[in-house]
Amino acid sequence: MDGDGKRHRILMVSDFFFPNFGGVESHIYYLSQCLLKLGHKVVVMTHAYGSRSGVRYVTGGLKVYYVPWKPFLMQNTLPTLFLTFPIVRTILIREKISVVHGHQAFSTLCHEALMHARTMGKENTVLRSGISPQKVFMVPNAVDTAMFTPSPERLSCDEIVIVVISRLVYRKGADLLVEVIPEVCRLFPKVRFIVGGDGPKRVRLEEMREKFSLQDRVEMLGAVPHAQVRSVLISGHIFLNSSLTEAFCIAILEAASCGLLTVSTRVGGVPEVLPDDMIVLAQPAPEDMVRAVKKAIDMLPGIDPQMKKLYSWDDVAKRTEIVYDRAMQSSKTDLLERLPRYLTCGAWAGKLFCLVMIINYLLWCLLEYLQPTEGIEEVPDIRLVYAHLESVNDMCRIQSEGN
Amino acid sequence: MEQEGKGEVSSGIYTYNHHCDNGFDIHEIFVKRSRFRVLLSYIGMVFLLASVSRPFLSEDKLSPGSSVWSITFGILVAKCLQYKPVKKESVVIMPTFGVQLEIHFWSGRVHRRFVPLGKVLKPLLNECVTPVTCYWSLSLLLCDEEELMLVFQKSRPPVKMLVPVWKALGKFLNSECQTCSAVSEPGSQT
């Protein structure tokens, strides 16, 4: 724990967490582990997955609450608006949470938890409309630098390999790929494609292969398990990302960490992810993407894959800690001060927001009456105690000798 | 939380008591009866009586169908409002035998469960998460059973009352374990 920083008690909320596997889930997990190493207390709240419900402890003493709400669509819980308030309030009180960190704009559980936390006066660190610009911080995502390292030997430049790894769905620009790949193969005879990933648009890519007879130049790998992503990435020179929308895109960060040059569509937060010498951006249109691929192929001989050092999770955790410290220092605003700010959001939206927040506040008062704060017991801090393990070994020894 | 007398702790509707009797270690949790719930259960009974007697007492004949429906509805309401209050739940630790879990009702009925010593592996303090709340419960991990056995089935005492019972159960199991191994060791040498 650092000397000058305070110890925060953080609640991470999201609909997406293990055993579901993806970018958001890994982000929450790695960030929580690094924050635990820095000495803070971290608790994760998510919905139950199948029979996995209740309290679980994962690596490093990270406590996860799998709340038994059923997910209704792609792992999102039904937007119940106020019904999650009792359990969120119970968790906030029993764990003595000071900061609520919401993840994923699509997560309904996350938005509700943040709304309830705001009503209860806890700090939260997600962009909400109506807050002043000083309160907005950009913390980049990180990549597992231990796992995504470049290949030890440089690949030969006789044949250029372009790697695409993404879910083959509309949002990830699979239709763009169908237009771009044949054009690139026609213009550059030395180029070969490796496409990893699965999804509804895979059929279109297969048809494209058939139509242009690209079976020997386009290799379809199917779904690639996360542990094998690195080995697929290091077999290529260039990584192609054709997403139509993207908040951050951890995939290009992983590719850059493996030493690949990236070609991506200029959407969302992608331009902020990598420095300009590691990425070539294009508009999400086939002609522009082909131009970008050409530029990348020309840049390729000048690239040294071993050179760059990107953000590691420890850096991200430290930056997040700074955000928490600043959030704690900012003055707490009570309901009456916040209501005028909500009214400015929009003609109808503002009034609706206000109504929702007022109802939330009244619900909080009702819960305080039905289940008083004093009745909710605080959970003791359970640290991993290694001394306890020795006594367990002694007990086992006695029992085995007794048999 | 107030201390009442020696070894007694009270919090909200629960009161914890611990005493020894003839070598048995007894932990008890007393539950205060809720007058509001008693009143509601009486209202439910009255409602049921009214719905049963209405077809017989009314002057104009009601159809049998509607009287059956009203009686059924009356039974359902009475069942929902029914209140079988628990007077106390106790844990009796019997050295060398096992653990007896008892539920005493205000009506005088007693429900007992005995768990032999060999069947209990460990007592556990578990955090239970429901869609609306989260609370602590004490349960026993049993040999060859998939489910945990709750020690206090009808009540949810605060964790401060569960901890002494948990510690006593743990100490009891440890001491029994050690006496078993101490007894068998001389035998193995012969």
Image: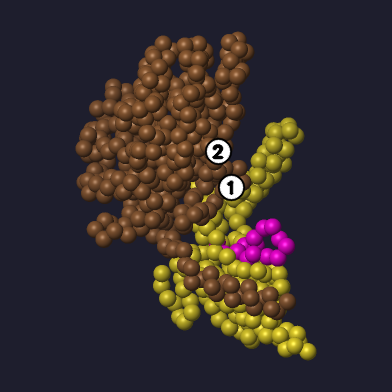
Chain colours: A brown, B yellow
A333 lies above or below B116: above
> Dot 2: few (<14), some (14–19), or many (≥20) neighbours within 10 Å?
few
Residue found 56% across the figure and 57% down from its top: B38
Q: Is residue A202 above or below residue A366?
A: above
Q: Is residue A21 above or below residue B3?
A: above
Q: Which residue is disc 1 drawn over?
A: A52
Q: Position of residue A232 (x, y in %)?
A: 53, 33
The residue tagged with tag 1: helix, strand or loop?
loop
Q: Which mark is residue B119?
A: none
* Residue interval drawn in magenta: B137-150
- Circle 2 is placed at which residue position? A228
Q: Kindly identify the residue that appears in the image at 46 percent across and 26 percent down.
A: A157
Q: Residue at x 22, y 34 (%)?
A: A133
Name which residue lies at 60% across and 28% down: A222
Magenta span includes B142: yes
Q: Is residue A206 magenta?
A: no
Q: Amino acid at mark 2?
A: Gln
Q: On the rendered image, what quadrant is the C terminus of chain B found in?
A: bottom right
Q: Secondary structure at mark 2?
A: helix
Marks 1/2 in contact by CB < 8 Å: the verdict is: no
Quote the CA–CA distance across marks 1 and 2: 27 Å
Q: Is residue B79 visible?
A: yes
Image quadrant of residue A218?
top right
Q: Nearer the viewer, mark 1 or mark 2?
A: 2
Q: Quadrant of residue B143?
A: bottom right
Q: Which residue occupies the extreme right position in the image?
A: B190
Q: Nearer the viewer, residue B142 or A350?
A: B142
Q: Position of residue A316 (x, y in %)?
A: 34, 44
